[in-house]
Amino acid sequence: MTRIAVACSEQGAYYRGMAERHGTPLLILDCHKVLSQYQSLQAALPNVALYYAIKSMPHEAILRTLVTAGAGFDVATVGEIELLQPLADSPRSTIHTHPVKRDADIRAALRYGCTTFVVDNVWELEKFAAFRHRVGLLLRIGFRASNAVVDLSRKFGCQFDEAPLLIRRAANLGLHVKGLSFHVGSQCATGEHHASAIRACRELMSDPSIGDGVPLSILDIGGGFPVDYLESVTTIDRFCEPIRRALSELPGNIQIWAEPGRFLSAPAGTAVSRIMGKARRNGVMWYYLDDGLYGSYSGQLFDHMRYPLQVFSDSKQREAAVIAGPTCDSIDVIAEDIELPPLEIGDLVVGHQMGAYTAASATDFNFFERAKIVAVNAGRGRDSDAVYYATA
Ligand SMILES: Cc1ncc(COP(=O)(O)O)c(C=O)c1O
């Protein structure tokens, strides 16, 4: 069920101004918000090095903000490296975390200067034999979190008891496995799954027979840090409490890394769409926006999220309504079984928490153009908002 807020029309002034200035559909990215999310996660996980998962919102303004803040980056493809390369001059603060890589991905990452790669199976290990003097590997272990909205350990991660064998196989190939990684799933309800995965990894890391005497010195605890969509989740400090406790049980010489995506990018994104048409069907008002499930709202399909919506009206009247996207496909419906005040063609509908896994997976099906991305508070003040045009 989608959460809808009706605010008085005066409160929509900022969005109307932005829509007039930049047109719709629009996705506003607030770089201050990225920075404050980064700072609050860093405060909740002191001594953990944060590598932004670029895939969640691969946008230059976010990368620039995080470079300035001192973050590292998690890349998965050649394209992500190409986006990052002109902005960051510290390739050592980059980790390549895709467990299954194309040869071109490995070579591009190495050319950039990234030397840490994640693997989770023997065939992937073999891909690195030719580069063994240039890389250090993290072995990804699968831990399934029943409470995560997006389960990432179905597709990736070796089984826990396979790990010693894979580390031995790496040593036989002359490869250095320098640590372990996991990703318990995205948008987790609690930090308990991270905590139990950390404890399981501690068991492996403290086994002297693992790694032929070369200690595993890095533990990468992945992403999964949640944000508020429909119901409020716990604060990030409370979420990280069990994680901090589990980390405190590790030997002091182990470096801890994390790969947050959603937590840094989601709250920074606000979608501003215009009602381009309306119809009454079986007594229900249908409002058609100029953005939808094939555009910024694609995360409703791919990422299984529902975004808090906001409309602006001074009317006290409410009626049954549907909010749909612009395409000819009937799946392109954003919210049903909702009540709205009467709205007009040209009115705005605003979607909040829309910075992660939204524009990243948008298409231009039907040739409805993707939302224009405007970065605000990017360090140059509102008068110089940076406008970025989506490319196909
Ligand atoms: C390898 C890897 N790291 C980090 C992330 C980011 O996860 P989240 O957005 O839940 O923080 C993902 C998400 O798919 C991922 O696959």
Image (tube, rainbow, N blue to C red):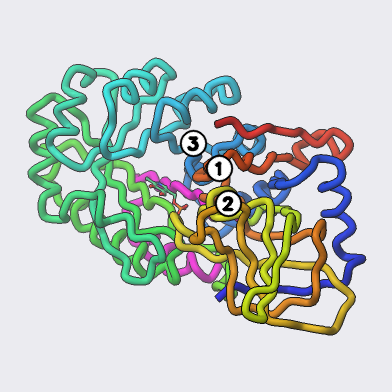
Residue 185 can be seen in this image? yes
Residue 211 vs residue 118: left or right?
A: left
Q: How many marks?
A: 3
Dot 2, crowdedness within 10 Å: few (<14), some or many (≥20)?
many
Residue 51 can be seen in this image? no
Which secondary structure lies at badge 3?
A: strand
Which secondary structure lies at badge 2?
A: loop
Residue appearing at x 39%, y 50% in the figure:
222
Q: Which residues are magenta?
A: 237-266
Q: Earlier in the sequence, mark 3 or mark 1?
A: 3
Which secondary structure lies at badge 1?
A: helix
Residue appearing at x 33%, y 43% in the figure:
218
Cα separation, mark 2 vs mark 3, equals 35 Å
Q: Position of residue 61 (x, y in %)?
A: 66, 35
Residue appearing at x 57%, y 48% in the figure:
295
Q: Amino acid at mark 1?
A: Asn
Specify the quadrant of the image occupied by residue 236.
Answer: bottom right
Q: Position of residue 190 (x, y in %)?
A: 43, 71
* In magenta stretch: residue 252: yes
Q: Amino acid at mark 2?
A: Thr
Q: Which mark is residue 235?
A: none
Q: Which mark is residue 73?
A: 3
